[in-house]
Amino acid sequence: MTKVTFKTADVDGFNVFYREAGPADAPALLLLHGFPTSSHMFRDLIPQLADRYHIVAPDLPGFGRSDMPPREKFTYTFDKIAAVIDRFTEVVGLKRFAIYIFDYGAPTGLRIAMKHPERVTAIITQNGNAYEEGLSEGWNPIQAYWQDPSEANRAALRQFLSPEATYWQYTHGVADPSAISPDGYTLDSFYLARPGSDDIQLDLFGDYKSNVALYPKFQEYLRTHKPPLLAIWGDKDPFFLPPGAEAFKRDDPNARVRLLDTGHFALETHADEIAAEIRDFLG
């Protein structure tokens, strides 16, 4: 049985919760989750990789069991989130590591990779977008808020924070929704319902435009450094389309692309397949 430990790191006064497994001297793999989840999303993947890799999976600032300071004390932007996680890797002693990036974890991890290309050994992107062609029409309400950050446009985004919306994200495009454990979406809804969480998430919806603005720089990083890259994608994702996965080959011609018959949260249905692909890829 794989032992997974649950810890909290003091990152210059900011508490970051994380899961850890595997030999400390094994090649390291940093798992970065997305919206609206936490490191809990990796619960089925970690045991399948920890015999060979040192796995570290933090909760991003404002998510899961990591600190969620009020907005007047912490500016919720992707630059700030990436800065905390970058420093977190130093605090927990990760010197060189591969990254698994999903959803919000993609702009977080790619910022770190651009800053420290010598530290990132490989990239696994599971529905972690870096190309405009990967954005679906599901982004239209959020893009409207980018263009006009009015209270009306901000209020319209609250629909994405409801338990019904979270359940839909988990089940959309899944052949058999009864195969989706309720643990994930129920826990996510619990965290989203915490006082103050709604406005934090709305701030991040607004700041996501900073990620799209960085897409050309992310792509330049890939062209310049050509890290080994695996794009493994739920092809029924309502937010990040398969062309976003295929586009990685444009800047990193040796990138592997694998499409899975599932939705956004591909680990909920295809953890075994994703683990096998990662073991082969990193091996």
Image (cartoon, helix red, strand yellow):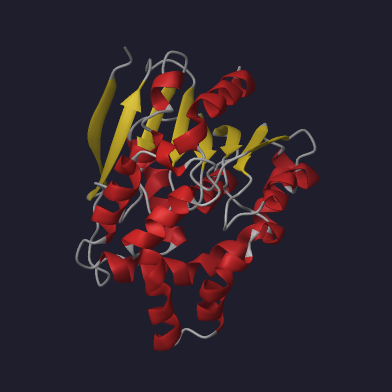
User: Which residue is found at the position 39% from the left and 87% from the top?
Assistant: 151
Q: Is residue 225 left or right of residue 21?
A: right
Q: Front-most of 222 and 268?
A: 268
Vertical relation: 27 (above or below) 271: above
Vertical relation: 97 (above or below) 148: above
Where residue 277 appears, as percent x and y from the top left, is 60, 25
Where residue 20 appears, as percent x and y from the top left, is 33, 27
Q: Is residue 11 left or right of residue 166?
A: left
Q: Front-most of 46 and 213?
A: 46
Which image quarter is the N terminus in? top left
Where residue 198 appears, as percent x and y from the top left, is 30, 68
User: Which residue is found at the position 47% from the left and 14% from the top?
Assistant: 52
Is residue 58 visible in this depiction of the protein? no
Q: Front-most of 9 and 207?
A: 207
Classify residue 276 by image quadrant: top right
Vertical relation: 96 (above or below) 38: above
